[in-house]
Image (cartoon, rainbow, N blue to C red):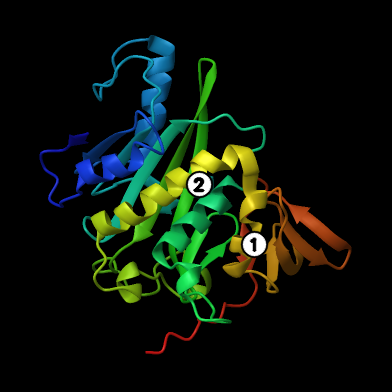
Amino acid sequence: MSLSERSHLDWKAEALWQDLTPLLPGISIEVLARTASTNTALLERVRSQAQQGTESRYGRRAHDMQPCLLVAEHQTHGRGRQGRAWLSSPGASLTFSLGLPLDLADWGGLSLAIGCAIAEALEPSSCLAAGQRPRLELKWPNDLWLDGRKLGGILIETVPAGEQRMVIIGVGLNIQALAGEPDTQPGATFNTGFASLSEFDATLDGPTVLARIAPAMARCLRDFPQGGFAAWTEAYARRDLTLGQPVSAGALEGIARGVAADGSLQVDTAQGLQSVSAGEVSLRLSTPPAAPATGR
């Protein structure tokens, strides 16, 4: 475990390490007050270790490919899918990356399963009344939404490391509304703005959210090589923001009909049912999603 001297939040890293170690043996937890991008930091670390065989700038052992959870209280150049920027500010956002060796024949649907694991950790389906729509939903292929607005995103990148392949899973979640930012930040779909977890539960802060979702992610990653996304299709369908909605994916337009066991989006078009892979295009909803009733 390693904590930056300038960290101003209590991340309870030792307790979290104890929770994660049985799931991901050998894991280390590091908290930085500030970095450009946690994904980039872990990617560079793996590349330098694999290519140079020398001790990395972060002080880890050469060729040490054990799991690592890297948290940044302030991420200055966060990246989303297809190079998009991700805004964050200290205390208002939770930004971290989890890196580990993972041997997968099929990577399809991993971001969807991770999204399900995060949503279930924060809003268990078992706590929802029969027929109640969850407030936390998932937009294919890597976004989490709350009450019809974007809450956060997942960025998965892989890098070869000798005989292994490392996967880096970056997560960014809004905890509080960004100071000085209006509800309609640039880039928000339909100009509906962004959501924050404080709207869901005002008691949540970054360390509390991390303590809930990191073990859920670890369990997902432990089980995914055996069952793949097929084991998550039912859970994903309950939170599928686009299901039955008009969507466009590049030049393709139609009605979203759910996600197949390989993680591909099924779109009902004038030419028939088409499969869309996550790496091909960005998905857009043609009409704004309705927010579920919250009782407030």
Quarter holding the N terminus is top left
Q: SS class of the residue under badge 1?
A: helix
Residue 238 left/right relative to 95: right
Residue 259 visible in the shown view: yes
Q: Which residue is mark 1?
A: 234
Q: Earlier in the sequence, mark 1 or mark 2?
A: 2
Q: Characterize the local packing of mark 2: few (<14), some (14-19) or many (20 or more) Cα atoms within 10 angstroms.
A: many
Tell me where residue 204 sits by quadrant. bottom left
Residue at horizontal 31 percent and vertical 73 percent from the top? 201
Amino acid type, residue under disc 1 in the picture: Glu
Q: CA distance from mark 1 to mark 2?
A: 15 Å
Residue sticking out furthest to the bottom? 296
Residue at horizontal 26 percent and vertical 58 percent from the top? 208
Tell me where residue 6 sits by quadrant. top left
Reply above or below: 203 against 158. Answer: below
Quarter holding the C terminus is bottom left
Residue 125 left/right relative to 13: right
